[in-house]
Amino acid sequence: MNAAHLHLLLNHLPVVGSLFAVGVIAIGLLFRREAATRVGLGLALVVALLAVPAYLTGEPAEDVAEKLPGVSKAVIEPHEEAAGLALGAVLIFGAAAAVVLLVGRGGRPIRKAWLLLVLLCGLVSAGTLAYTALLGGQVRHTEIRSR
């Protein structure tokens, strides 16, 4: 297994996981199930932690990918730049979820406003991760390149 393979294995987890966490938090809010919102917050924290190794394997994966035919720095760079932004967004999502979990520890109720803020962070995070994934897919999938 090389660095590119490891990166491809890891990078799907934050993308799908962030959507799943946002969905669980939203369901908890919609149906007023605090247990569901707490599970969603916990998932957000796990997703943020999983994003770190996905990001850190990007540079070694680039070293492998740029030697492949049809792959250029011009295709990789937008993905790399978006990945930095996405990492920041998902870390904010995870940190916000952790703070809300800490505030609500010991069975204390979690305020709806805090959950809505975390949900907003999650939506931004999911969007940036999805865009980063699209750009990453374009590295090897010429059929989805716009240029």
Image: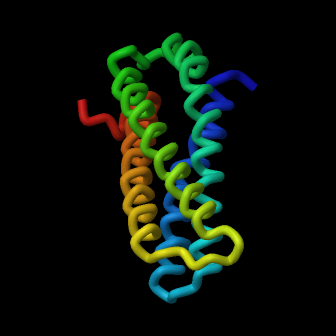
Residue placed at 54% from the left, 49% from the top?
95
User: How many numbered callouts?
Assistant: 0
Q: Nearer the viewer, residue 69 or 91?
A: 91
The quarter of the displayed image where residue 53 is located: top right
Residue 22 vertical position relative to residue 85 in the rendered view, above or below? below
The quarter of the displayed image where residue 85 is located: top left
Q: How is the image coloured?
A: rainbow
Residue placed at 56% from the left, 56% from the top?
99
Q: Nearer the viewer, residue 82 or 112?
A: 112
Q: Is residue 66 left or right of residue 61?
A: left
Q: Is residue 77 left or right of residue 32?
A: left
Residue 125 vertical position relative to residue 77 in the rendered view, above or below? below
Residue 40 in the image, given as x and y percentages of width and height: 59, 67
Residue placed at 37% from the left, 44% from the top?
131
Going by the picture, which residue comes out furthest to the left? 147
Image quadrant in which the N terminus is located: top right
Residue 75 vertical position relative to residue 32 in the rendered view, above or below? above
Residue placed at 42% from the left, 18% from the top?
70
Residue 8 in the image, given as x and y percentages of width and height: 60, 36
Q: Is residue 114 left or right of residue 107?
A: left
Residue 117 in the image, given as x and y percentages of width and height: 39, 63
Residue 50 vertical position relative to residue 24 in the rendered view, above or below? above
Residue 10 in the image, given as x and y percentages of width and height: 64, 40
Going by the picture, which residue comes out furthest to the right? 1
Image quadrant in which the C terminus is located: top left
